[in-house]
Image: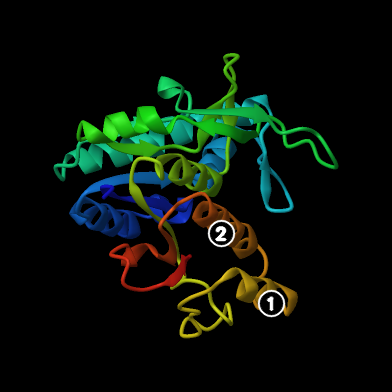
Amino acid sequence: MKEKLTLIKVGGKIVEEEDSLRQLLEDFAALPGAKILVHGGGRSATRMAARLGIEAQMINGRRVTDREMLDIVTMVYGGLVNKNIVARLQAQGVNALGLTGADMDIIRSHKRPVKDVDYGFVGDVDRVNGERLAGLIHKGVVPVMAPLTHDGQGRLLNTNADTIAGETAKALAAFFDVTLMYCFEKKGVLRDAEDDNSLIPHINEEEFRRYVADGTIQGGMIPKLENSFDAIHAGVGKVIITQASAIDGVSGTLIEK
């Protein structure tokens, strides 16, 4: 029987506000067994860019990462946000290690090809070295992963944190019984985005397609669920979409085979 591993992905809003960050790290530290934390930090990057007189550009809700913005996200994601989390987890007795995809060649990616939009230095993941990550975890290390990868040619790439979480979970499914948890501000997948009590507790692919067709599920929840089903097909045990204050896994929307 494989050892259980919990992979938590939290959005930037959670890690950028003191109250939610403190609660998250306390809850994460209390989680038993092997675990990984993947974080965002987009609003912090936008604020830092503004302080430095650099305008952040978004197209269809996605950040355009030119050379100046790549410097900003590297500083903020890999430095300010990541190391703050690591230090605070260490203070709670968690042997945390901050990583980008470049560290130990954990995540290799390629620059997204230009189609209708040039997003700049944005990476699409090619592979995650699950064996190296598993080796760290088996030594008692708790990886804290920033949303940065590299192309193997010396260039860092800004990479979607949901994608990093999903691809990392898939790579580790060969070594662990993985639970992937996407955490954000809502209770889970909702039938009505304005009604927190309209939680959909379970969802399968047929229901997902139906909800997308009738407009119940839309926007950023669509790729999050697509990532979830991809992870399940690749051997991840279950995926939970829930509030960051509920990482004990007893509530939220459950996706499993």
- Residue 202 rendering spot, x and y as whole percentages: 48, 76
In-front residue for pair 249/5: 5
- Mark positioned earlier in the residue sequence (2 or 1): 1
* Extreme residue in the front direction: 1
Label at residue 194: none
In-front residue for pair 46/175: 175
Left/right placement of residue 115 relative to residue 129 reads: right
Tell me the quarter of the picture where residue 237 sits. bottom left
The residue drawn where x is 63% and y is 33% is: 123
Count residues near mark 1 (Cα–Cα under 10 Å), then give few for <14, some for 14-19, many for 20+: few
Tell me the quarter of the picture where residue 95 sits. top left
The residue drawn where x is 32% and y is 37% is: 143
In the picture of the structure, the residue carrying the numbered disc 1 is 210
Q: What's the residue type where badge 1 is placed?
A: Arg
Count residues near mark 2 (Cα–Cα under 10 Å), then give few for <14, some for 14-19, many for 20+: many
Disc 2 versus disc 1: distance between alpha carbons? 15 Å
Left/right placement of residue 99 relative to residue 116 reads: left
- Residue 181 rendering spot, x and y as whole percentages: 41, 58
* Extreme residue in the top direction: 153
* Image: 153 above or below 210: above
Query: Which element type, helix, strand or loop, lies under badge 2?
Result: helix
The residue drawn where x is 44% and y is 46% is: 169
Disc count in the image?
Answer: 2
In the picture of the structure, the residue carrying the numbered disc 2 is 229
- Residue 178 rendering spot, x and y as whole percentages: 37, 51
Q: What's the residue type where badge 2 is placed?
A: Phe
